[in-house]
Image (cartoon, helix red, strand yellow):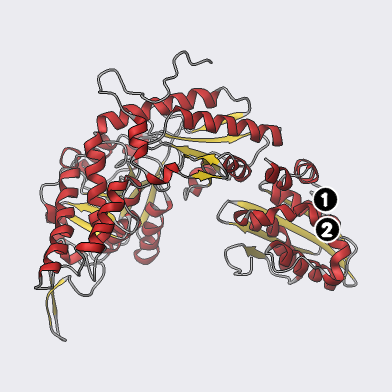
């Protein structure tokens, strides 16, 4: 298949203003560096995205000019830091369209957010015999916390199957739901395959069965607008570092009344109202779930990242990434012996593949020599790899700074892989 | 590309495409399974030990070119060795891979066959691929059943 038109820089959809790729790239200092003497084609944003200068500057400014602990100092600097931190919470609330900033809990990452929900729901709400529904597409972070709970409480874990394209099977899901279903915890977008799941239907059906719903939005938040009120999910988690923000900060959104009904996950400072040796009265949300000094500069960096993607606009980001995904899918499909794993009709900009005669790790090493960074392995989704009968894949994931030239570098690098391994 | 050619030498590619002793010997009396949970590579090593000597050795498994070639080369080199000699070879190879030593002492002559793997040292993320089968060999000698690259901090 030949691609008739191959725009080098701009790749906007018909109804969106031009996406100026080179200007976007100039915002990311790391993209100017060379790796092994080659231009860096960074195709691992699904693992962690690079940071725009605005985020780096915000963190630097925090530490250089406005840093102190939050929520306790009476002095000006602490008040500024608290404003920055609480301002970030409000920004995240608007980003997700939450009703109230108190519904936003800052955590260490998405994994910590899921663990918080699992632990807290396990302290009273869930009982032996209750069922938690997850899917084959889950990252280990949305499997293991529920397994720990299963082994501790005797709850039952049910897994929604997928088809060979990697699509969530809604009818099978519906059959798994019953009055025993107490929690549905499903990914919005598969990190390993890119599959976008039908979350509106998943949430609606879960609620009809009387279950609470947690959506793992780690791979969704960087690519599309999320509206937690429209979705009506009970919990939504994502991580800062995949949305072009810093590592060390994650977000748990939860409906206020639900969060208020849940016991704390960790105890300590900042999450209390009063403490005596006999009794502690817990603080209201969100502080109840934020024990200890929070990730202050990280929250401020996340706010800057949200400003950055919001200014670019998700309509433009999505159109651009879709064009790159389409181009990558076409070019990779032309390579003999290459098989794309995950061919769902609705996909985020992630392409997982295996190549005849070459192991994903060997692919990764050879591509690296060409300056092309891809992920190789099981992507923290071993059950999913087992489902396809493979140990792992090579995965190219595209962020807003990737273009057709990155896809070309990938395809050229795969040519070298084939030279070596045949 | 020069570093890559150093890493993926023809001998490595040959052994990875057509691994030697890729079998379970009929009279194997020791075996162990090894895995690298970071990449999903799995290998099983089988030994026939008679009078303290490795009279036969084979392996099975799946993995990258480096891990398959390293396992294949290992079976060729340890066959006929005493248990003590096989352990000494492991130590020398391990030191070579982790850059502790390029001087192999008593085992120097034997390790010549493995110099084709010396390119791996330039790729720190890949050293575990080369050492997985050797650690599995050690587990078999120690009569341990399994070994993981993430459970032994020396790997």
Secondary element under disc 1, as helix, strand or loop, is loop
Q: Position of residue A91 (x, y in %)?
A: 17, 49
Q: Is residue B73 left or right of residue A107?
A: right
Q: Quadrant of residue B1?
A: top right
Q: Chain of mark 2?
A: B
Q: Position of residue A98 (x, y in %)?
A: 14, 46
Residue at 54% from the left image edge and 35% from the top image edge: A353
Observer able to see residue A239: no
Q: Are marks 2 and 1 on the same chain?
A: yes
Please say if the residues under marks 2 and 1 sit with CB atoms less than 8 Å apart.
yes
Front in this rendered view, residue A324 or B80: A324
Residue at 63% from the left image edge and 44% from the top image edge: A362
Q: Is residue A221 left or right of residue B121?
A: left
- Note whether B145 is above or below B121 in the view shown: below
Mark 2 — residue?
B57
Q: Position of residue B84 (x, y in %)?
A: 83, 73
Front in this rendered view, residue A181 or A100: A100
Q: Chain of mark 1?
A: B
Residue at 45% from the left image edge and 27% from the top image edge: A404
Tell me the CA gap for discs 2 and 1: 7 Å
Q: Which mark is residue B21?
A: 1
- Note whether A268 is above or below A128 in the view shown: below
Name the image quarter holding the C terminus of chain A: top right
């Amino acid at each position: 298949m030949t691609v008739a038109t191959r725009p080098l820089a701009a790749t906007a959809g018909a109804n969106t203003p031009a996406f100026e790729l080179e200007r976007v790239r100039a915002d990311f200092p790391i993209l100017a560096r060379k790796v092994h003497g080659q231009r860096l084609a960074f195709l691992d944003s699904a693992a962690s995205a690079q940071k725009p200068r605005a985020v780096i500057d915000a963190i630097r400014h925090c530490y250089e000019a406005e840093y102190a602990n939050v929520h306790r100092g009476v002095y000006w600097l602490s008040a500024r830091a608290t404003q920055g931190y609480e301002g970030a919470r409000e920004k995240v609330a608007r980003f997700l369209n939450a009703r109230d900033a108190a519904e936003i809990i800052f955590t260490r990452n998405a994994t910590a957010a899921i663990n918080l929900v699992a632990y807290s729901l396990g302290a009273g709400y869930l009982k032996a015999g209750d069922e938690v529904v997850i899917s084959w597409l889950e990252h280990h972070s949305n499997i293991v916390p529920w397994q720990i709970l299963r082994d501790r409480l005797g709850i039952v874990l049910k897994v929604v199957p997928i088809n060979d394209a990697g699509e969530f099977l809604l009818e099978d899901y519906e059959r798994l739901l019953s009055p025993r279903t107490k929690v549905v915890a499903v990914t919005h977008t598969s990190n390993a395959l890119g599959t976008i799941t039908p979350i509106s239907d998943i949430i609606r059906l879960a609620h009809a069965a009387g279950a609470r719903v947690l959506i793992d939005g780690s791979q969704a938040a960087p690519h599309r607008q999320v509206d937690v009120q429209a979705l009506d999910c009970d919990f939504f988690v994502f991580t800062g570092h995949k949305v072009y923000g810093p590592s060390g900060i994650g977000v748990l959104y939860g409906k206020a009344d639900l969060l208020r009904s849940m016991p704390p996950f960790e105890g300590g400072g900042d999450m209390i109202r009063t403490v005596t040796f006999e009794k502690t009265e817990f603080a209201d949300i969100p502080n109840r779930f934020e024990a200890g000094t929070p990730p202050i500069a990280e929250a401020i960096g996340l706010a800057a990242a949200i400003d950055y993607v919001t200014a670019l606009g998700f309509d433009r980001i999505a159109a651009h990434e879709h064009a790159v995904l389409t181009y990558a899918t076409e070019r990779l499909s032309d390579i003999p012996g290459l098989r794309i794993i995950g061919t769902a009709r609705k996909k985020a900009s992630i392409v997982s593949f295996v190549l005849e005669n070459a192991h994903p790790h060997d692919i990764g090493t050879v591509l690296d020599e060409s300056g092309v960074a891809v992920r190789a392995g099981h992507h923290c989704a071993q059950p999913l790899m087992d489902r396809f009968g493979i140990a792992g894949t090579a995965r190219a994931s595209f962020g807003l700074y990737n273009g057709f030239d990155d896809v070309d570098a990938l395809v050229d690098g795969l040519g070298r892989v084939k030279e070596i391994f045949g | 590309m020069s570093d890559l050619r150093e890493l993926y030498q023809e001998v490595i590619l040959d052994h990875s495409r057509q691994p030697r002793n890729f079998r379970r010997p009929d009279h194997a009396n020791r075996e162990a399974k090894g895995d690298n949970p970071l990449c999903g590579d799995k290998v099983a090593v089988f030994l026939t030990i008679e009078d303290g000597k490795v009279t036969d050795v084979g392996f099975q498994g799946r993995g990258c070119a480096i891990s398959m070639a390293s396992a294949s080369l290992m079976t060729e080199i340890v066959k006929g060795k005493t248990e003590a000699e096989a352990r000494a070879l492991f130590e020398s190879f391990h030191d070579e891979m982790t850059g502790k030593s390029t001087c192999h002492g008593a085992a120097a002559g034997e390790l010549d066959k493995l110099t084709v793997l010396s390119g791996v040292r330039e790729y720190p993320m890949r050293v575990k691929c080369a050492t997985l089968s050797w650690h599995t060999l050690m587990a078999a000698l120690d009569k341990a059943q399994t070994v993981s690259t993430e459970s032994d901090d020396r790997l």
